[in-house]
Amino acid sequence: MGRVSRARCVGRDAELGAIADELVRARSGVRWVSVTGDPGIGTSTLLREVAHATDATVFAATALEAEQGMAGAALAQLLQQEPTAVPAMAEALLARVSSEAVSLVVIDDAHLADDESWETLTGILARHRDLRVLVVAGATARFASDILKNRFFDNELRLGGLDAEAVSEIVHDRGIILHPSMREDLWRHTMGNPRDLIGLLDESPRALWSQPGGDLPAPEHVRADIRARLDACPDDGRRLIEAFAVLDDGQSLTVAAALAEAEDTFAAADHALATGLLTRSADLAPAQVGLALRSPLVRAAVIDAMGLQATADAHRRAAEIVPDPVARLHHRVAATPDADPALADELDELARARAAEGAWREAATLLRQSSRITQEGLKSDERVTRSVDALLSAGDCSAAATLIPSVESLRETPLRNATLAYLAILRGRATEAEVRLDRAWAIVNPEREPDIAALIAGRRVLHALIRGQGTELIDWVDRAVALTGPDSPAGVEATVIRGLGEAWAGRPTEGVTTYAQLSEVIRHGAQAQRAVMGRGWLEYGIDDLDVARASLETAVSMARLGGSDRITLWSLAWLARVRFIIGDWDAAFHTATQGRDLATTSGITIATPLLEWTVAQIHSLLGRWDDAHAAVRRAEAVGTDYPSMEIPARLARAQVAEAAADYATVIHELGPLPRLARSVPALVEPGFWPWVDTLANALVLEGRLDDADALLTPHEKRADERKHPSASARLGYARGRLLGASGDINGARHVFERAVELLLPGPNRYDLARVNFAYGQTLRRAGKRRDADRVMSIARETYLGLGAQTYVDRCDRELKAGGLHTSPVTRHDVSLTPQEESVTALVAQGLSNKEVAAELFISTKTVQYHLTRIYAKLGLRSRAELVASHH
C-alpha cells in the first residue's frame, strides 16, 4: 500500500530508534509494541512517522469511535477496502503478510478498535508466530490498560513531554521569534505536550513570544476542558481546585482547604481529584496529604475561569491564611491593582533581608513587585535596578538580561552602572566592565550612599578575581568592609574571596587561615557556598586535592539550598579540574558537561573556557580528536577578554596540540603567557594554572633549550619557596627533558626521580604518568634501553588505567622503538630495526620529519638518517613510495 500522510515529528529519536530495533527483531517472528501517552502528546504523529520512514510493507488503520461497533472495521482499513465478512478479510490479511518482506501493522487509537478486528488480528499472529510482522498499536494512556491488558505486547513505549530543544524546534517551524528566556518558560508551562504547545502558539499574539516575562495563558481547548470539569465538580471540590490555583506550589492541603472554606477537607479533596485536575504530590512529609495541580496549564485555565474579581478576592483571603511572610506579601501584591507605597516599602524591606541571607532570586521577585506598586518614579527605577542586580547575584543572567533594556533606559546612577558592569563581568566583557565600574566609582558618594559604594567595591572584587589580581582584590575587599562593616551583605560577599587574593599576592598560608576563620563564622546559606567554593579553589591551587574535591563537591551540593549559579559554575569548573588531575576522568567529564549545561541555561559565559579546557583535554587524551577540537572552538566562541578566559582557552588548544605531538602549536598558544604573567599575579603562583611545564617541554622538543631554561628558573624557585610538590614535579618534568637534551643524563635522572617522589604520596595520577613518560623517553635517547623500558612500562600502565589511549599508543611505540621486547621486523626478507619500524609507521601516517622527531623524542637529523636506511633496505626512492607501500 502507499505511504500515509504525516506531520513533522520532532523530539522522538529514541522512540523511533526503539521501533526500528523492533522491526529488525520482527525478521525472526511476530513482535508487538504499544505506544501510549496523554492526549495531545504526539502518539499519532509518531505512528505516522514510523509508517513513513520504513521500507517495510505498511498496513495502517486509525480506529474510529463511530466504527467501534462495526465488526471488522479496523481490518477493512488495514486492507484499504470496504468492510466484508471478517473471515474473508482475515484470509486476505494473512495472505498479504505472509511474504518474505517484513510487514508493519500500525493501528492508531487502538482503544477504539472493534473487538472482532482485534481478535482476528491476534488470532492470526498467534497461530503464525514465524510471520515477519511488527504490530505497533497507539492508545491514549487512560484507555490503554483496557484495550492492551489482554494482549501479548513485547514492548511498551510511554511517551512523555518533548524536551526544551524539541519545543524550540516546533516554535521555529511556525516562524515564531522566541525570546531566549521564553524557551524554558514555554517548555515548563506546556510540559512539552505538542498539542497544547501548538494551540498556545497559534492562538496567542506573536508579540507575546518575543517579550520576556509575563503570565502565560492556556489554549482554548484546555480552557474549555477545564471549564467543563469545573462545572461538573461539586462546589467544595471546585473551590479547592481554585484555592490550589491561587496558592503557590507546595502549599499544604490544610491551607488550601482553609482558603476554599471546605467543611469536609477529605470529601472536597476526593471531589477535586475525581476531575483529574489535581494529583497527589510527593513533595510534602509522609504524614501529610499532599495535592498539586496537574500542570501549569491547568493553573492558567482555572485562573481564567475564575475571573479577575474572584481571583483578587482569593489572593486577599490567602494573604491572611498562609504562614510564610513572603507568600503573604505576594498575595497582597496580586490583589493590588494600583500603587501602594506602604506595601511597596514592606516588600523592599523584606527583599533587603532576604538578600542579606543570600536568597537573591527571592529578593529579585520582591523588588520587581515593589517597583510595580511604587508611586515615586526614581524609587521605582532604583528597585527595578536592584532587582536585576539580585538576579545577577543569583547567577541568572538570562532572566536579568530580559530586564536590562529597561535599566539601560533609566537615568545614570552609580547603582545602574554597577549593575550593568556586573552583567558585563558575567558575560566576559572586561573592557565594558572596567569602564562602567570606573564611572560608578567616580560618581558615587560613599558618605551619602555607603551601601551603593560597598556594592561597587564588591563588583571590583569580582573584576579583580577574574583578572587574577591578588593585591587589587584585597584592596577592594578592604574598601567594601570599611564602608559597611564585615557583617554587611557587601562585606561578607567580598570577604569570602579574600583568601584567593592573598594566595595570588604570594601569601597562600594567609589565605588558608582566612578561610579557616570564615568557616567558623559563615556556616549556612548562599554566602556559605561562596566561602566553600573559594576555599576549594584555593585548596586546588595549593595542592590539597582530596580536601579540594570535598570542598568543591560541597559547594555544588549547596546550590540546592538557594546558592548562586555563578558560584556553582566556578565550583563545577574547578571540581572538574581536580577530578581530571586525580584520574577520575569519567566524573571530570560529567562535571564539566554539567557546568556547560548550567552556563547555557544561566547565560553566564565567564566560566565556559575553563569548563571546555577539561573537556578538550580529556577528549584528546582518549583519542577523540573531533570532539577535542569542538570543545576548543566552544572555549574560544565566548571570547577571551578576561585572563581567566584567555588562559584556559590557550591551555585547551595547547594541550590538545601536545597530545598530538604538535609542539610548534603549543609554543604558539602558550608563548604569550610569560608576557601576560607580568600583569596577572595568579598566572605565576604555582598550582593554579599548569602552563610553564607544558611550554618549557615544547621549547625543549623544538630545540630551544636556552629559552626553556630561562622560563623554568624563576618558576622553579617560586615553587620551592611555596613548598608546592606537584608544581615542582611538573617543572621537574620539563627540567628533566632539558637536562637530557643537553646530555646530562645523570642530572636528568635525579630530577625525574625527585619529581616521581614528590607525586607518589598524592592522588595526582595524570602528572605521574607524564613524568614517567618523559623520563622513559629521555632514558631511551641516552641509550639506557633497559631502564627506559622499565619506566615507560610504568607510564603505559598508568595511562592505560586512565584510559588515555593517545599516550598508551605512544608508549607502545616507545617500547617498540627501544627494541628490548621485539625482534627486527622483516618486510619481504628485509629487516628493519624497531626504531626504523617506528619511523616508518609514523611517516606512513603522514607526519613530517619534525613531527616524527617530536613523537619519538629524537632529532630531525636522526629521523632523516633512519629514512635513508629504510629507503635503501626497502628499495624505495621517496617518501611518497614509502607511504604508498603502507596503503
Image (tube, rainbow, N blue to C red):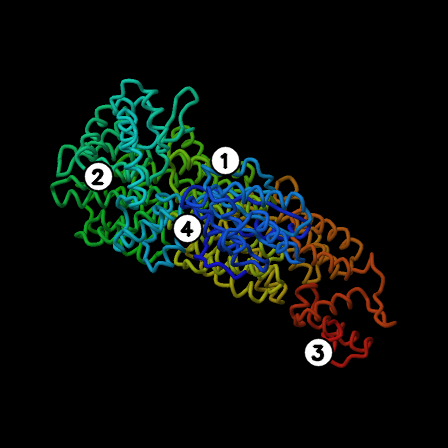
Label 3 and label 1: CA atoms lie apart by 72 Å
Q: Seen from this angle, which residue lies furthest top?
A: 263
Element assignment for label 2 = helix
**Which residue does the numbered mark 3 point to in the structure image?**
880
Tell me residue 879's x, y (percent).
71, 77
Label 3 and label 2: CA atoms lie apart by 74 Å
Position above or below: 55 against 472: below
**Which residue does the numbered mark 2 point to in the structure image?**
369
Q: Quadrant of the N terminus?
A: bottom right
**Which residue does the numbered mark 1 point to in the structure image?**
146
Label 4 and label 1: CA atoms lie apart by 44 Å
Q: At 11% across and 42% down in the image, what residue appears? A: 376
Element assignment for label 1 = helix
- Packing grade of label 1 (10 A; few <14, some 14-19, many >=20) is few
Residue type (three-letter) at the residue carrying disc 2 = Gln
Dots 4, 1 in contact, CB < 8 A: no
**Which residue does the numbered mark 4 point to in the structure image?**
600
Tell me residue 865's x, y (percent).
75, 74
**Mark 1 vs mark 2: in front:** 1
Q: Earlier in the sequence, mark 3 or mark 2?
A: 2
Residue type (three-letter) at the residue carrying disc 4 = Thr
Label 4 and label 2: CA atoms lie apart by 27 Å
Q: Earlier in the sequence, mark 1 or mark 2?
A: 1
Q: At 71% across and 73% down in the image, what residue appears? A: 861
- Packing grade of label 2 (10 A; few <14, some 14-19, many >=20) is many
**Mark 3 vs mark 1: in front:** 1
Residue type (three-letter) at the residue carrying disc 3 = Ala
- Tell me where residue 478 sits by quadrant: top left
- Packing grade of label 4 (10 A; few <14, some 14-19, many >=20) is few
Position above or below: 530 against 839: above
Answer yes or no: is residue 541 visible: no
Q: At 38% across and 29% down in the image, what residue appears? A: 521
